[in-house]
Image (cartoon, rainbow, N blue to C red):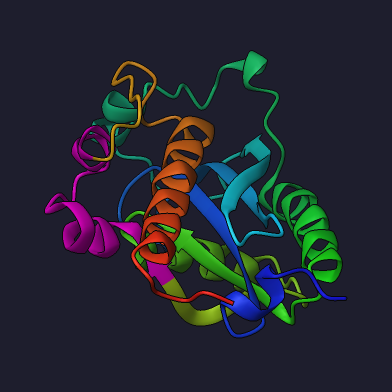
Amino acid sequence: MHPPISDRFRGFLPIVVDVETGGFNSGTDALLEIAAVTLIMDDDGILMPDETLCHAVIPFEGSNIEQAALDITGINPDDPYRMALDEEEALKSIFQPIRAAIKEAHCSRAVMVAHNAHFDLGFINTAVTRNNIKRNPFHPFSCFDTATLAGLAYGQTVLAKACEAAEIDFNNSKAHSAAYDAEKTAELFCGIVNQWKDLGGWNK
């Protein structure tokens, strides 16, 4: 018997992602952190976060890093204690357990969930191309955007405010860490999906 999640999103497995970067341009600006949260669904159709995967990333050669971006994230790219990996190694390390989760869930591929999702998807897709990685587990353009979903569900599009409206604890001092933001985005997405189920949407 296939897990319920294999039917919920048309054979796609939602994976929550957050990236921290050196700017807004995926082609020129550095990828500094990447985090992903896998999701699972119980036999009653309740969606919940499972495993958090996270790596600091060494900026690719020639990449741009805006000081304003570092001021927001608090990242010091030169800090040796970041234990950063190069882009290719970081991406492959994140993708391997995602592929395992896809297989375990009997899904065909992953679909990215993120807050302002096309930003994160753009950086991941560009880094995959830059490093000539052949097997990207994510759908190339489809995604779930929690900014949009939270705007619908709670009238809020900022992650912190959406979490507050959803009664999810949010610590602003921990924000702009890829792992923290991905985990909070996962809680928000699961809450919206489960609330929709409770209201009578998608019950199998």
**On screen, residue 59 above or below 15:** above
Q: Quadrant of the N terminus?
A: bottom right
Q: Is residue 107 above or below residue 160?
A: below
Q: Is residue 173 left or right of residue 63?
A: left
Query: How far from the left and from the top, in percent, is residue 27?
Result: 43, 65
Find out whether residue 128 is within the magenta segment: no
Residue 146: x and y in percent read 33, 58
Q: In front here: 120 or 13?
A: 13
Quadrant of the snapshot with the C terminus:
bottom right
Residue 176, given in percent of the width and then of the height, sits at 37, 31
Tell whether 71 sits left or right of 174.
left
Bounds of the magenta span?
A: 144-165
**Residue displayed at 54% across by 62% down:** 124
> In this picture, is 15 found above or below 2?
above
Is 158 magenta? The answer is yes
Q: Residue at x 43, y 65 (%)?
A: 197
- Mark count: 0
